[in-house]
Amino acid sequence: MGSIIKKVIIYAVLVLLILEGLVRLFHLHNEMPNRFADTKGVEKWVPNQSEYSITGNRKQNVGQYRINDFGFNSVHDKYEPKEDAFEIALVGDSFIEGFHEDYTNSLGQQIEKNLSNTTVLEFGYAGYDLADELHLIHAYKDIFEKIDHTFIYIRFTDDLDRDAYQESSRLRLDTPFTRIAKQIKLLVYLKDIGALDPVLQLPGRIMNFISGKKEISLSEEELRKQEKLKNELSLNNFKTLLAEYPIDKEKFTFLLDSSLCTVQFLEYLNHNGYNFLDINTTFSKAKTPTTLIYDQHWSKSGRSLVAKLVLDYLDISATNY
């Protein structure tokens, strides 16, 4: 019996080693850079990291990233605006970060390559919400004051859940244990495709079973009330954040999707002189999918449409100016 168990263990280890080798050989795993908070308390990627971001369970999307000296994914190293050039800043979460595309063909580069004497500085970081973005802008006020125009990407449904900035729990997840776990590429791959979800959810289910806690199913009326309260809270959070971190309304434009926003939020932006650029105006007319099949992020077609929207907006703004 002991001999059988020993053989099973040996074969299991061999199978795992073979699978680990295959995952590495075909580079099926996602390589995420390490995070840190700089001296100004701004969460970024550790500078000078370069790898490939893999999305989907069959390498459905591959993008090369390059973390610059400043801690963001970009072809540019130094974020030092010049008086004799036109600078644009893109600030946002993973949509602006652009790990789904090679950094040489990012949203910022698609905009920059169509403009003369212009540099697009990208401040994209997965997980940023409006509080993070405004904290970044005010922490580096000396840089943003010299930038000619800044676009802040926000999703009404995700980015207005808090009314004040505080350090994210993401940094606390970056521990020596998780860094070791990241070196086991089979584990990274299985986690990314959701194969480990049942195992990771098991402790919570056991605790709920022991405590007798049951999932509560809400009626449609209760769900509508919850959504209404959340929308009202999001608008109030926006007001609070902009009161704490005021912006120059002539130099800042919000990039958003109106189909995700409430009428009240859009009316508030209009009535209070906040400029915004609506992605939905072009996405709603698109002939090809604007998002990835397995992901909510923009596809190549979607990024191209956003780039053109920004270029047209800048062209109109320059004409009006």
Image (cartoon, rainbow, N blue to C red):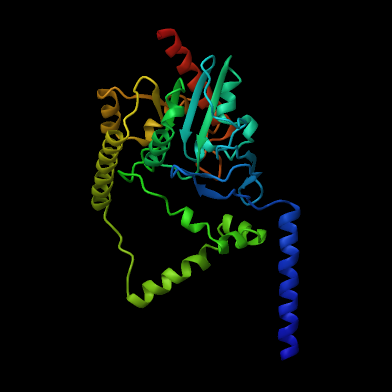
Which residue is rendered at x = 32% and y = 24% of the image? 274
Q: Position of residue 104 (x, y in %)?
A: 65, 31
Residue with the most extreme bottom position: 1
The one nearer the camera, 52 or 81, is: 81
Q: Position of residue 118 (x, y in %)?
A: 56, 18
Residue 296 shown left or right of residue 135 in the figure: right
Residue 152 shown left or right of residue 5 in the figure: left
In which quadrant of the rendered view does residue 103 lie? top right
- Residue 44's place in the image compared with 198, above or below, is above
Q: Quadrant of the C terminus?
A: top left
Residue 121 shown left or right of residue 53 in the figure: left
Q: Quadrant of the N terminus?
A: bottom right
Q: Position of residue 111 (x, y in %)?
A: 56, 23
Residue 18 shown left or right of residue 40 in the figure: right
Number of marks present in the image shown: 0
Which residue is rendered at x = 72% and y = 63% of the image? 19
The one nearer the camera, 317 or 207, is: 317
Q: Position of residue 217 (x, y in %)?
A: 30, 60
Which residue is rendered at x = 27% and y = 34% of the image? 243
Residue with the most extreme front position: 39
- Residue 255's place in the image compared with 200, above or below, is above
- Residue 169's place in the image compared with 274, above or below, is below
- Residue 280's place in the image compared with 193, above or below, is above
The one nearer the camera, 247 or 156, is: 247
Tell me, yes or no, if residue 279 can be seen here. no
Tell me, yes or no, if residue 226 can be seen here. yes
